[in-house]
Amino acid sequence: MTDQHHLARRLGLGDAVFIGMGSMIGAGVFAVFGPAAAAAGWGLLAGLALAAIIAYCNASASAQLAAQYPSSGGTYVYGRERLGEWWGFAAGWSFVVGKTASCAAMALTFAAYAAPAGFEKPLAGLAVAALVLVNYFGVTRTAFATRMLVVASLLVLAIVVAVGLSAPVAPTSFAVVAGPSFTTGFSVGGVSSIGLYGILQSAGLLFFAFAGYARIATMGEEVRDPARTIPRAILLALGLVVAVYLVVGVVALRTLGADALAGSPVPLVDVAAASGFSWTSPVVRFGAAAASLGALLALIAGIGRTSLAMAREGDLPRALATVHPRYKVPHRAEVVLGLIVIVVVLLADVRGAIAFSSFGVLLYYFVANLAAFTQQRPDRRFPRWLQVLGMVGCLVLVATLPLTGVAAGAVVLFIGLAGRLVARRWRRP
């Protein structure tokens, strides 16, 4: 491969962990707890645990595969190598379209906290353009910017937890709800009929927040000593973020109650406001904006690398496979991505984007688990039953996502598969 198509290895373990954390913290804490609370009330904590278990299964599969195939593209590459071209394309297409929706969700979340009323969408579009520019000038700048944004976000979350614990406890009621075993549940904080289905749906939505743990696997050509660094970075980033989510989720439910959390567009601002410390609201808004920008920055980098890998194989236009000769980034892929995300930002809303993104990402990790299941003993780092659990978990969570998100995702997946079939027949002599 020529230098024009080759990326430079410039990232260490710390950079990789921060890129993974940056991909998760903005998504989960500031965008997902509201929809998850609407689905399950206090049951979202059970959903969080379930999402974390499935994410661990998927992380172990991604780590194991990344050690054997340390190149850009993530599961797109793993699927092609272990299962065949069509499996790889299905994974890559699901990732690109799902994470494009994630980019829009993060840009809109940033604007919800940072923009005056009525200016959210224009500011979200400007944020996308600015971060595409940051990525354009090199992956080390991406890693440094992500590190700064993650540190700022964690400091603000610490403030939220501290002032939230000083606020009065929201009233909470528990009452058994009669019904068939599948829907039997309880009423929590005013949210009624929360049962197994609601918990599973909250897990599917919360999984959106964890999806950044394997972002570094899509940047395998830019990590030093990838066989050692990538598995460690993935599992370390996931463990740290699960702990952060658990603490913040408990404090938010304790302070607001399930109903208020479900209905709030800026829940952590409301947690801070409940404490009575007026100075905390602008600080929390700043932290939310920083976290969302950190997630958006890492998402753009990850999608650009998967698009690069797909373009190299002809599954996307080959012009997108060009790497900048000086900055060593897939600059054409990232510019095209930025333009598409800006269009989505102008048309979409946060909650719809989350459901659509979860559909694509869960299918992506289903392929990752299936590919890891086929690895032989010399390349195995984790037992096969973890991959089986991951596959079953991904399919169960897809089935419980909001119907509109599943339907839209299925249509886009079909369009991608059909488009590849037509393109292959067109190119065939």
Image (cartoon, helix red, strand yellow):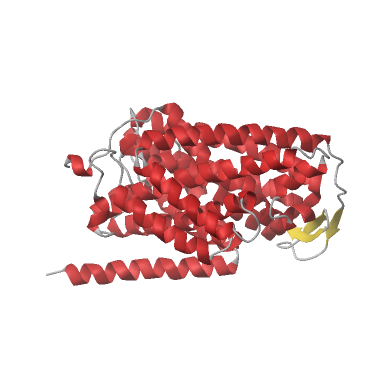
Residue 373 image position (x, y, % from top left): 40, 46
**Residue 344's spot in the image, x, y percent?**
48, 63
Instruction: Report the side of 242 relative to 282 (left or right).
Output: left
Q: For residue 384, which quarter of the picture?
A: top left
Residue 190 is left or right of residue 156, and the answer is right
Q: Is residue 319 above or below residue 233?
A: below
Does residue 198 appear in the picture of this structure?
yes
Q: Quadrant of the C terminus?
A: bottom left
In the image, taking residue 6 as reference, residue 227 lies left or right, namely right
Q: Give whichever of 143, 137 is nearer the camera.
A: 137
Please tell me which residue lies in front, 21 or 172: 21
Number of labels in the image equals: 0
Image position, residue 200 (x, y; %) = 64, 56
13 versus 354 height, above or below: above
82 sits to left or right of 163: left
For the N terminus, give its image quadrant. top left
Q: Can residue 396 be seen in this snapshot? A: no
Looking at the picture, how far across and down is residue 260, in whole percent? 78, 54
Tell me the residue at 38%/33% (across/down): 140
Residue at x 59%, y 45% (from the top left corner): 289
In this view, the residue farthest toward the left is 429
Task: Give the residue displayed 78% in from the left and 35% down from the top.
Answer: 163
Q: Nearer the viewer, residue 80 or 191?
A: 191
